Amino acid sequence: DIQMTQSPSSLSASVGDRVTITCRAGQSISTSLNWYQQNPGKAPKLLIYAASSLQSGVPSRFSGSGSGTDFTLTISSLQPEDFATYYCQHSYNTPLTFGGGTRVEIK
Amino acid sequence: QVQVQQSGPGLVKPSQTLSLTCAISGDSVSSNSAAWNWIRQSPSRGLEWLGRTYYRSKWYNDYAVSVKSRITINPDTSKNQFSLQLNSVTPEDTAVYYCAQQVYSYGHNWFDPWGQGTLVTVSS
């Protein structure tokens, strides 16, 4: 199984801040990496697929980068609606696995 | 626009079978460019992929090793839906269960959309 490790597990930030979340895969997965946002009591929502492709309807302040084992999700200017938990997920093979999540909190 | 809508009981007794259904609109369970997945989420296990069913000239299933002996995911083409059955449940199976479409495009795949989630509690 491919282990996905996210860091940090939580962070505090202010509106307008630039936020970066990292995800490391236990082996090379090329660009087979997706990012999701989850709000409390809701299902995860796709933000980024194939490491850097922005899902339709997702604001352009979200961006993804990386390949191989190291990936990042960046929010260029944090907005109030962005306070949520973010998960990475590899799509390289089965079993499909998720990172442990990064909770973005208001400072 | 594809939508998936889950249904099923929120309370299951230990040793019994957990059964959930996911109804699909806007796509076909027999699509050659999709797979239909069940994922669960709990504080102790995080987001855990359980398995999927998909059609590529014939039906296939993939299951997570952790539940492989207890799980069945079936398509229902007449109702355009798919189901999850998890046998011999214990309190450790208590979680929010999600269905999700796995979209395939240009050599990549991702989960979208997701169902609304069903909190299933295993308790007597």
Image (tube, coloured by chain):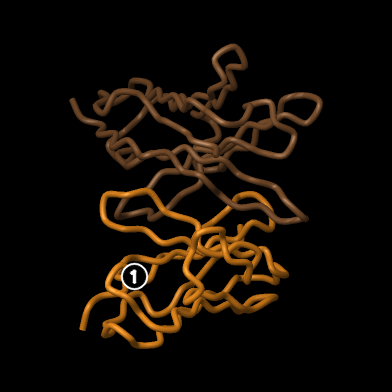
Chain colours: A orange, B brown
Q: In x, y percent, where is residue A70? A: 61, 79
Task: Name the residue beneath numbered marker 1.
Answer: A82
> A37 or B26: which is nearer to us?
B26
**A98, above or below B26, in the image:** below
Q: In x, y percent, where is residue B107? A: 77, 55
Q: Is mark 1 on a helix, strand or loop?
A: helix
Q: Residues within 10 Å of mark 1 (few under 14, many from 20)?
A: some
Give me the residue at 47% from left, 61% from top.
A36
Horizontal relation, residue B50 to residue B104: left or right: left
Give me the residue at 60% from left, 52% from top.
B110
State the residue lying farthest toward the bottom. A17
**B100, above or below B56, in the image:** below
Horizontal relation, residue A12 to residue B54: left or right: left
Q: Which chain carries label 1?
A: A
Q: In which quarter of the image is residue A18?
A: bottom left
Q: Where, quadrant-wise, is the N terminus of chain A in this rendering?
A: bottom right
Give me the residue at 46% from left, 49% from top.
B48
State the residue lying farthest toward the right. B57
**B77, above or below B45, in the image:** above
Q: In x, y percent, where is residue B21? A: 44, 24
